[in-house]
Structure formats: C-alpha cells, structure tokens
Image (cartoon, coloured by chain):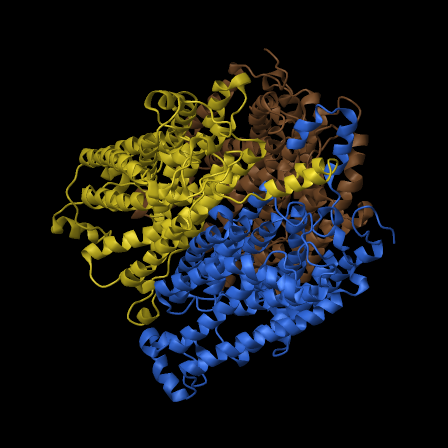
Chain colours: A brown, B blue, C yellow
Amino acid sequence: MGKGMYGPCKTTAEVLTLFTLQIIIFVLMGTLMTYGPQANAKMSREYIVQLPNAGDIQVYPNVHVMIWVGFGFLMTFLRKYGQSAVGLTFLVAAILVQVAILCQGVLYLTENSGKAPLSLLSLLSADVAVAAPLISMGALLGKTTYMQLICMGIIELIVYTINKHIGEKYFVAVDAGDSMYVHVFGAYFGLAVSFVFGLRNKPKNHHLEGANYQSDIFAMIGTIFLWLFWPSFNSASLHGDDQQRAIINTLLSISASCVMAFATSAVVSKDNKFNMVHIQNSTLAGGVAVGTAAGMMCEPVGALVIGAIAGVLSVLGYKYLTPLIQKVLKIHDTCGVHNLHGMPGVLAGLFGALMAGLATIEQYDYSLYEIFPARASSSMRTVNEIRAEYPVNPGQDRTASGQAGYQLLTLLVTLLVAIITGIITGYIINLPIFGTVPEEQYFDDAVNWELEEEEHEVKHKEQTNIEQLPMGHI
Amino acid sequence: MGKGMYGPCKTTAEVLTLFTLQIIIFVLMGTLMTYGPQANAKMSREYIVQLPNAGDIQVYPNVHVMIWVGFGFLMTFLRKYGQSAVGLTFLVAAILVQVAILCQGVLYLTENSGKAPLSLLSLLSADVAVAAPLISMGALLGKTTYMQLICMGIIELIVYTINKHIGEKYFVAVDAGDSMYVHVFGAYFGLAVSFVFGLRNKPKNHHLEGANYQSDIFAMIGTIFLWLFWPSFNSASLHGDDQQRAIINTLLSISASCVMAFATSAVVSKDNKFNMVHIQNSTLAGGVAVGTAAGMMCEPVGALVIGAIAGVLSVLGYKYLTPLIQKVLKIHDTCGVHNLHGMPGVLAGLFGALMAGLATIEQYDYSLYEIFPARASSSMRTVNEIRAEYPVNPGQDRTASGQAGYQLLTLLVTLLVAIITGIITGYIINLPIFGTVPEEQYFDDAVNWELEEEEHEVKHKEQTNIEQLPMGHI
Amino acid sequence: MGKGMYGPCKTTAEVLTLFTLQIIIFVLMGTLMTYGPQANAKMSREYIVQLPNAGDIQVYPNVHVMIWVGFGFLMTFLRKYGQSAVGLTFLVAAILVQVAILCQGVLYLTENSGKAPLSLLSLLSADVAVAAPLISMGALLGKTTYMQLICMGIIELIVYTINKHIGEKYFVAVDAGDSMYVHVFGAYFGLAVSFVFGLRNKPKNHHLEGANYQSDIFAMIGTIFLWLFWPSFNSASLHGDDQQRAIINTLLSISASCVMAFATSAVVSKDNKFNMVHIQNSTLAGGVAVGTAAGMMCEPVGALVIGAIAGVLSVLGYKYLTPLIQKVLKIHDTCGVHNLHGMPGVLAGLFGALMAGLATIEQYDYSLYEIFPARASSSMRTVNEIRAEYPVNPGQDRTASGQAGYQLLTLLVTLLVAIITGIITGYIINLPIFGTVPEEQYFDDAVNWELEEEEHEVKHKEQTNIEQLPMGHI
C-alpha cells in the first residue's frame, strides 16, 4: 500500500468497498422494499390515493436543501477543505439516505410481513435521519477517510432508528423537530467518536485549521439556507394548526438566536467585532433549541426566549467550552457541533419537558391528545365521547408531569445511547480496513481530490512570472 | 474608547444595545402577540382551521430566500465587504422581521382589543416589509455601523407600516408586488438618509469601492435567486386567477428586463462588453416595474414592454444618472438602489395607475371589484345582486379614472413620506450613540469582523515564502 | 470593426440585434398569446378556476432553480469563465424562455384559432424546453459569442418543439422526465454544432481550459441544486401516484449514480482520489437515466440499478470516451455533455422501452392506460366498461412490445433529428453576422465582460507593493 506525498493512497481494493456497498443496497432494496400504496399504480382503484398535503410536498424539497446545501456548504469554512466538505457531504448523504430508507423498512418488517412501503414521507424521514450522521461528521471534519465516515454513518443510522423507535413508541415522547433524536444524538455520537480519535500530539492549532476570506463566505451559503428552511424542518412531521405553530415558533426562536449570537460574539471577541465562526453556527442554535417544543403552545415570547438563550449559550460554548473540552477531555470538535447541536439540543429537551409538564386541557383543548397521545384516556368510553367532536385514539392516562418525566427519560436515554455507541463506533472505524488520515494531512483537500490548481500553478511558474500573478487571483 | 488600526472600536456598552433591543422585543411580543386562530391549538374545535392554500405555503419560503439569500448575496459584490454584506443582512433582517411583526401587531391593536394574532401570513408580510429597509441599506452599504442600520430599519418599518396602511385603507390603492410601498419607499428613504451622510470629501472613488472577479460571482448568487423568486414576491398577496396572472406577468416582465439590461449594458460599455454591475441589478428591474400592476389584465405583451423599459432605464441610470446625482446632489448610492428600486418603482406606480385607469367591467368581469375593491358599488342592493354570482363587498363607487388618481396619489405620498422621514432618520442615526465609520474605513470588512486571514498571513509570511504563495491562492 | 487586445469587439449594430430580437418577441407575444382561462379575470365566472395542484405549484420554482442556478453555476467550473457561465446562462435562458412560450403558442395555433393561452403550466413547459439549448451550450461553452448561442437556441427550440410533438402525438411515446426530448436531443444537437466548429489546430489543452480551487466549489452549487431538484423535474408532468413514484424513482436513481460516480472516479483517477469533473457531472447521470421510465413501475431496485449503471458509464465516458471523440471525431465537448446528458439519455430511452415492453395490466391495473394511453382499447364499448371504475380515453390497441417499439423509434428519430439539424445549425451560426471568438480567446471572460480587477490591479501595482499582496488574495 503506497503512500504519495499527499494523502494516504487508497488501494483499488479499498475503493471497491464503495461498489460493494451499493450492490448490497441493491439486494436489500430489492428484497425488502416496494412502492407504498400512494405511489403504486396497482393500488389506484383499491386505495383512494391520499394526495400529500400542501405542507408535505413543500417541506420535502426544503429539508432536502438543508441536508445537501446547508450542511455541505456550512462545512466549507476550512480554507483548504471546501471541496471535501461539500463533496463528502454529497457522497455520504447519498449513501446514507438509501441506508436510512432501508432502516425504516427493516423496522416496518419487524412488525409486518410482505415488503416495506416507500412513499414521499419515507424520503422525508430519511432526509431527517441523515442529518444525524452529518452532524457527527462535523465533529470529525478533516480528520477521517470517507470510508470511516460512511461506516460511522451506517452504524449511527441503525442505532438512531432504534433509539428514535424506543422514544416514540415506548416512551411516547414528543420531539417535533427531532432535537433529541437528531441533534443531541448526532452531536454526542460524533463527539464520542472524536474522543476515540483523540489528540495524538498535545492540543495545538493545525496550520490548515482555519478559514480564509472566501471560504467564510462560502460557508455562509450553508448557514443562510439552514436558517431559512429550519421552520420547514421543525414542522415536517406536523399538520394543520400544529404545523403553522411550529413554523411561527421556529422563525421566532431562530431569529432571536441570530440576534443574540451576533450580540454575544461582539462581547467576547477582540475589539467587539464579530467572529465568523459564531455567526456561521450559533445563529442557528434557536432552531435546535425550540425543536422539541416547536408544536407546543409555548407562546411567541417563549419561542423568542428559548432561542435567545440558545444563541448566547452557543457563542459562549465556542469561546470558552470548546477549548476546555479539547484541553481536558482531549476531544477535538472541528465544527463545534457541541455548541450548535449538542448544548442547544439538550436545552430543547429540557424546554420540551417543561412545556409538556405545563400542558393543560384548558390551554390545548382536545388537541392535547393529538400532540401528546399518551395523555389521552385509556378508557374506550371516554375516548369515544371525545371522538364525537375530535378524532382521538386511546392513550395511557398519562399526567402532565408524567409526560414531562418521559420527555426527560428520552433525553437521558438518547444521550447515553449516543455516547456509548459512539465510543464503540470510534473503535470500529479505527480498524485498519477503513484507512486513516495522518495528523499532518488533516484538513487538506489534497487527501481526497486531484486538485486542478497544483498542476497549472507549476506549469505557469515555469512559463512566465508576469502572467502568474494575475492568474493566481482568480 | 480605544481605536485600533482598523475600525471604530465599539465599547461593550454600545454592544449591549443589541441585547437590550432583543429584550424589549421579548416584552412587546409577550404583551401584544399570541397565536392566531390558524395556529392555535385551543381554537381547533371552535374554528374550522383554514389550511393555507398551496400558493401561500409555497410563496413563503421563496420570499424568505429572496430576503436573506437574495439581498444578502446581491450586496457581496464589493471586493472587501462580502462578509458584512451577507452577515449584516442576516443580523439586520433577523431583528427587523421581529420588529415588522410587532408593527403589524400594534396596527391591529389600534382597531381591536386583546392580543394581536400571529399566522403564516404575518410572517410572509413581515418578510415583505423587511425588504424596504434592506433596499435602503443598499444605498448606505459600507458606510455605516450596524447600529446605524438597525436604528434606521426600526424607524423605517414604523413609517412603512403607517404609509402602507394609509395607501391600502384610506386610498384603497392596489400594489400587488409592493412596488410603491416597498421599492419606492425603501429606495428614496435610503437615498434621503445617504444625502444626510453626505460626501465629506469631494466625490472620488474609494480604493475599496469596487468588485473583484470572485465577489462578482458571489453577487450573482443573489441576483439569480432574486430573479427566480420575484414571481412569488409579486403574487404573494393574491389568489386564484390573480395569482397565476401575477406569476405570468412577472416572469415575462423580468425576462424582458434581463434581455434589455444585457443589450443596453453592451451599448453603453467599453468595447460593447457587458458590465457586471448592470447585469447584477438591472436584470431585476422588470420585477419591480410590473409589481403594482402584476395582478391586473395588462396582457402578456404589456408585461414584456414595461419590463423592457425598466431594464433600459435602469442601465442608463447606472451609467449616467448615478454619477450625476453623486456630483450634483452629493448623494452616494453604493448599490445603485435608485436604478434598481427607485426609478423602476416609480415606473411601476405610473404603469399601475395607467392600467387602473383602463380597467373596465368588460375586461375583468366581476373580478374587477375583487382587484379594485373601491370600484364596487356602495349600494348594498347592487352588491347583493352581484353576490348571487360572485363574492363582492360594498365599495366606494369609484370610477376607473378615480382609481387611477388614487394610485398616483399613493405614489406621490409614498415618495414624500420616504424623503422627509428619510432625512429626519439620517440626522437621528448620525447621533454619536450609534457610532460612525470614518470615511477611510468605508467598504472594509475589517470594521466589523475579526478577519481570519490577517493572522495566518502574518504567520505564514514569517515561516516560509515558498509555501505562502500557493496558500494565498485558495 | 475594431479589435481590442481582448475579445472580438462587437459593433453597436451587432449589439442592436438583441434589442431587435426582444421587439420581435413583443410583436409575436402581442399577436399570438393571451392569458389562459386559469389566469384570466374575465373567465372567473364562466370557468371554474382549476387551482394548480400542490405538486404543480411546488414543482415550478424547483425547475426554475435548476435552469438558472443549476445550469448556470454548474458551468462556472472554468477558472476564468465563471462570469460568462452564469451570466450567459442568465441572458440566453431569459430570451429562450420567451421563445419557448411562443413555440408552444404557435403549435397550439396550428390546431386552434384565436389566441394561444398562457398558464403556469406553460411557464413550466417553457423552463423544461430551455434545458435543451442550455445542454447544447455546455458542449460549446467558452467557444462562441453570445449571439451564436442565442441563434442556436432559437433554432433548437423550434426543432425541439416539432420533435417532441411528433413523439408525443404521433408515436405516443412516454418520456416523463424528457430524457429523450430534452437530454438526448440537447446533447447530440450541441455535439453536432461543436463538430462544425471543429478543432482548428490539433487537439491540445487550452491554457484556460481547466478549473481552479474556487471555481470548482462554485460549480458544486450548480451540481447540488440540480441533484436536489431532479425529482421535481422528472415528476413535473405527472400527477397522483405517478408523481410520487417518479419522485421516489428519481431520488433512488440519482443517489445510486452519485455513489457510483464517486466510486468509479476513485478507480480511474491517480492515487484513487476523486476528480471534481466527475463529481460535478456524473453524480447527476442517474436523474437523466431514469427520466423516461420515472413514472413506470420499475420498482425501487430497478431505479437504483439504472442510476448506478449511468454513474459508472458517465465517469468512464469522461475518462476514456471524451478524449477519443476529440481525437477521432474532432468534436470538442467543454462540459462533457455527452457523458452527463448524451449517453445517460440514450440509456434512459432504452430502459424506458424495456419497462414499456414489460408493462402488464396485472402490474399497473387500469392506470396502465393512463401512463401508456396508446395501449387502451380503441373500442368505445371496452373503454366505457373501464370508465365506470377509472377514467380512460380510447387508445390504439397497442401491445406492450408495440409500445416498446414506438419508444425506440422516438429515441432513434430524436437522435437523427438532433444530429442533422445540429449540423445545419452549426453552419448557420458560423455565418459572419453572429461574430466569432478566436481560438486563443476561448474560455476567457474578458471576451464578454468589463473585468473589474484588471483596472485596480494595475492601479495597486503602481501604488504600493506591500499592500497589493493581501488585496490580491481577496
């Protein structure tokens, strides 16, 4: 296995694992999945086709943009790792969206027979699921091979599916914007993996670990698209008034976090200027922090306050906590996912529990039982009385504080599962078969890409010196 | 209050105004606003939830993209002010969208009691409102502190809300795409503020006032997204056939202005080449110019012609009028908002008045009274006859020429209000508490941002000279 | 007619053709087109306004983004032709979208009297049509004047309209994602034009024919938006379960092609790294390859496999076929449209024929006759029996293999028409009146644009040497 000047040369055998992986997906998809009734020509008579409502068909492309444009460009901030940021997000997410569909399918087949159905909603859920490994990727950006990322992502999606299933089915926890299932899980899983990677030398700044003027603007493409479509993300699984409320709450929360991130950045930075890292990331913290409670009646001012807290907390995290974690716990976090997804996600879980604990039938009317299904009466008779006015299913007679407890339990379980399985995954992807990037080649696109410029620079240097300068500008 | 080499150092006290502002918003939002019935869990039985129609829920994310991606990136054209362009648009718009929601709320509360309702449509209206101060910001880009921009924006939104309310309620003027309320108002308000800023030295070109190759491409991201979603903007407040007509008219008008802007740019530029400033801006003039009449029956060819005129006018404005205004009136207009929003907006107002003056019952059938509500009969009996076939409210018996007159009046009032309040605002934001940017630091990101590059450049210069050159390219 | 150091100076007369063109469009649009009933105020009583369904109104902005952002930025990969890539796409598409609307109108008027109707669906069809000349432009990028591109586009749209009409009306061929009508047609038309342009010198690499680090990232903006919204493109003309199926099939196919393009790129590139050209283009091949059959029951695994084949084929095309075509056939293909649109389009046609040949009533139930209208019975009695359960029109009693045959015939005719009319068009646009770009000025933005940088570079060089270096970076 040869090593060039740049990057760990991959053997062709290694490369073939990508083919193998896609072929395994063929087999599983062929064996397990088929079109769901909404997408199946044969069902058009037997089944009255439920058109996706306006909300669903709108939300899907927006979430789609968040995953590939949002995450992809957000990570282009490193001055010499932009092609990998957007390129590897592209590759990793394209594989994992297929894996996420299969995970859903397998989950369906544990309880049903035949083949698992595919619909527009499956694709939407798969996009949401893929966000978790992309968040973890943020903690590891620039330090892994793409096969390490892919392997991590596959394991993570399996655990994610199980953890979310436990939360939704057994704990009947509410998490509209998936702040616990996606953000907390993805962040702490990634940090756990990064912990295993460790810091071989003592903490220092790598010479390529930083932005430049252009890369910071590219990253803002990601930030802005994430910020814009976050209301779609948080309202993706809701309908009717819940969906509108989630859009409003998220817009308010993420606006407040934007303002507070700027304000706090100016306070903690030199000369009271703004710091691009804070602006690119902490402005989004309000979208995470309101996620769990997005569909609840937290009132406009509640959404604003939780977003503002998240914005402040996130910037302080970048300034003080990240260096501390790196120094004390030896966990390196390239994009600072702990500040954008980790802490705001925990905040979301706590705020969700609080709102759940405060939810009363006076405030929500019967839609309380739609938002918190476990709070409905388990007695068929009581349910049937309500059903005359409002569609409700029998629940578990849960009280408000009971629901709050289960919300907290879900947050705790998610944290534990993420950290434990993350550490295990860290050891797995450090196995030699996935390759490894030497520390001196961290954050360098040359590891993954045939860089165009290297060649013509040399060519031009040889030719003329006068022409080379203007060329270089471009 | 120390001053570094770059930029006016802000004191921490100054920075705290951002926090204060957000906290005032908390209090007002908590006191004044609550969820509207469409977004309120409690209303789900009492109120038959009106689902937002397919158009509304589609239009909102598109307008959202225009405000933050469109305006933000359009202004990245300056070679050394790209981070501020996109970053300050982000901050300013995030505060102002909350302020705009509050302005709507206060307006509602002048006529109603209780709390003002929030819905998806409130958010859409708030986004549209925010466009006005962002247009004004274009005239001032690179010359103000962010607190000056924010203060200007808050005053502007209050005046905007009142002016639009007068136009809509008292003059019953039609302005589907808000060409008068947003574009004319925003442009002349900004120019009036810029007039107060003045040109301290004699007009000259600042060494940073210009684009470079990369920044011109970044700006095209803004141009293209604005161009693409302008049909959504102009049709945002319409429904049914009016909405489709507005989409068609806007697409045709903005296509014609794009072609004519290219053609005129080639005629007036050296060697008949294209000029990026014209292409980035004047291609959009057709979207403004058709705005007022977007929902009217101007026929496809009418939309094309008005767009084409706007495209030509806008490029000629950049070439001949802007230098003249700078020389004679001492008004500096960084982005040339007079050419993109000012003149095309006035054109829109005139074209809207013309189309309103030509509108007949033969051409529109009863939907005349939907588009121009004041033209409906004030007699309940006549209205009731029509209502058997078409939903109409009693109006003011206005004639076509009466409606045209009110359209012109609205344009005139908007212009006057914008200029007068703009000048006053200019003096207010020049108060010392908002800070000020010295003229030699205009158009420089270093005023607002901790720039990454400065540091590592120095580091690399010290280390090696050979490595530094390829680094710099990236 | 003077010639500057850079670029063929256009005479003002030449430039005036753009004005003339837009004026001709005014006349034709005024003579031929009016609002369709869905967009006409007058029809609001006579005609029950059909609201566009959620799908349509969603799909239009997405396709719109693909055309201008997708194609525009995809072509910014050349290091010194980015402004032309995005700028000329902007100009050319803005003219051609109007021409495409007129072509549809003329086609309508060959069979109807009065004026041709405009609706949201007309705009959507026009956007789809414009994709064909933009694909052809990819083969010619950097080698033509903009008047050559526009002239080519107008001819191409006329032929496109006729060819698609023959395919849809006379052959009753199915091509949901327009893989034959748009991709095959656009690619081979462009290659035929490029063949006429020829290679005046022996094949060599132009010193500007290549990317740099930044331009490669800009191009990824185009790639990602095309990739994201391809499901919208392929499902644009479908409804209900067909539309959902097309979205699912396209997402799966384009995901598989993304993975396979990465995998194959690593296999064929030096040191098993990835090559940006492959990633920018071949990742999209699956969207093309599944286009014809997007609405058919090819099962999830079928969509994955066809996408994977297209991804592999496309990268191999870039690596081996493009150099061969350039050497042997003397056809230069700047963007490699043969690999992204040509071959995958032919593959789509073959796969569509295969799926059509396999389609049975058992698999599709009566919706077989909706997807393949010619397969319905021509007997009114049989049709009426079905109609009791499902809306069907009388067809042509076609068998499955008959349908497959017509699919292949359509592919063949499209190929022939594209190549023959492309060669003729190549000769037409080489007429002197359209201007010409000398080979040494290929791929150079200076031909079309007043470049900002040239000026200030000189200015700065004169002033100081110390300041110039940091400036240049930005």
Q: Quadrant of the C terminus of chain C?
A: top right
- Decide which of A338, A368 is in the foreground and name it: A338
Residue C203 rendering spot, x and y as whole percentages: 41, 22
Q: Establish if A68 lies above or below B207.
A: above
Q: Quadrant of residue C2?
A: top left
Residue A173 rendering spot, x and y as whole percentages: 61, 47
Number of marks in picture: 0
> Does the image show residue A174?
no
Which residue in the rendered view is the most extreme toward the right? B1
Which residue in the rendered view is the most extreme toward the front? C2
Residue A465 rendering spot, x and y as whole percentages: 63, 26
Q: Quadrant of residue B31?
A: bottom right
Residue B350 rendering spot, x and y as whole percentages: 47, 72
The answer to whether residue C438 is left or right of residue B92 is left
> Does the image show residue B283?
yes
Q: Quadrant of the N terminus of chain C?
A: top left
The answer to whether residue C368 is left or right of residue C336 is left
- Decide which of A467, C283 is in the foreground and name it: A467
